[in-house]
Amino acid sequence: MNTTQRPIEKISRKLALGLLALSPFLFLGTLDTHASPAAKLGAYPGKPSAQKGYVSPWSLVREPSAGQTEVIGGAAYGCIAGASNLPDTGKGYVAIRRERNRHYGHPETLKLVKDMGAALSQRTDQLLMVGDMAQPRGGRMESMHRSHQNGMDVDIWFTLAPSPKAANILAPDGNDPPSMLDDSKRKLSSRFGDDQLFLLKTAAQRPNVDRIFVNFAIKNGLCQSIKGDRSWLNKVRPWWGHDAHFHVRLKCPAGSPECKQQPTVPQGDGCKNEVVSWMKKPVIILKKDDRPAPRPPLGPARCVALLKKGTTDGGVQTAAK
Ligand SMILES: [Zn+2]
């Protein structure tokens, strides 16, 4: 469990499983296909493959497919052909946990990261830390992530790093950087400052960003504090978890006719009924053993073909049957 997330209410295993059973309905209700309530454990279990034995065949493919870039399917059921790999570090950013091989994406996703790093470097020497993007061909990961499958999603940590070397100390595998909420888990902590606000606003104001997921208490904090232009709050969506990082999802890019675009976010700043209803939800902390054991389908038919293409690895072919 993420040591930065202290339980407020511990619930029984039975109740936890019941809530997990309900999670698909929560999913549909919000149109945000990101994660189940269990994501509050932290999106990054230390050793994802230890999740009740589930091995995603997508994680066994170490290289992107050759040829033209194309996004196929949606964020939670899709893949990407011809993905690009984000360099380890660049102006204003550092990609952490490279050993997970999850820094692939569409060129527009890489451009977003590079542009945000460059924008941040105008105001500070600190670096933004880039977490998971997609696997070389996208597809399902072996962690709590349901999304990040089609190369249009990227996780960015709220905590900045003084250097690439320091980034790995700040975020060793399995131990996330700190939450931006205080101990009540209902309010922003003093860690959330102008740089964090700058990052969210910069991402939200990009036309090709579709939505950004943050913890509902972060959204509520923004609703309470932002003066002047509040139009960018529209894309900042309240969700479970996401109190130490935010998740940026880009719109389907040109040249990918089979990319599945989510419905547009509702109009307005989302600060009235929606965020109020989120703030009434209990903070649920699940135990490690309550994680579901998913055996998700591999993806759309074209993704299954992409998974097998040019791979001779026995494990991949066996798993992809
Ligand atoms: Zn994410």
Image (spheres, rainbow, N blue to C red):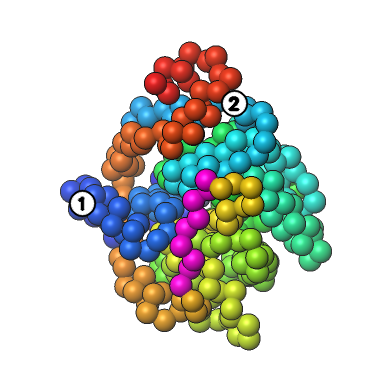
Inspect the image, locate mark 2, and give the three-letter code of the amino acid beneath it. Arg
Asked whether residue 131 is in view, the answer is no
Q: Quadrant of residue 319?
A: top left
Give the spatial CA distance, label 2 vs label 1.
36 Å
Q: Quadrant of residue 193?
A: bottom right
Could you tell me which residue is drawn at 67 percent across and 65 percent down?
Answer: 206
Inspect the image, locate mark 1, and give the three-letter code of the amino acid beneath it. Gly
Q: Are the residues at dot 2 and dot 1 in contact (C-beta closer than 8 Å)?
A: no
- Find disc 2 in the rendering and name its residue: 62
Residue 141 circle label: none
Residue 18 circle label: 1
Up-down relation of residue 23 to residue 122 (above or below): above
Could you tell me which residue is drawn at 68 percent across and 31 percent down?
Answer: 67
Residue 263 shown left or right of residue 286 in the figure? right
Could you tell me which residue is drawn at 33 percent across and 58 percent down?
Answer: 28
Q: Residue furthest bottom?
A: 228
Most prominent secondary structure in the magenta stretch? loop
Look at the image and give the residue range highlighted in magenta: 258-266
Asked whether residue 137 is in view, the answer is yes
Query: Mark 2 or mark 1: which is in front?
Result: 2
Could you tell me which residue is drawn at 65 percent across and 65 percent down?
Answer: 207
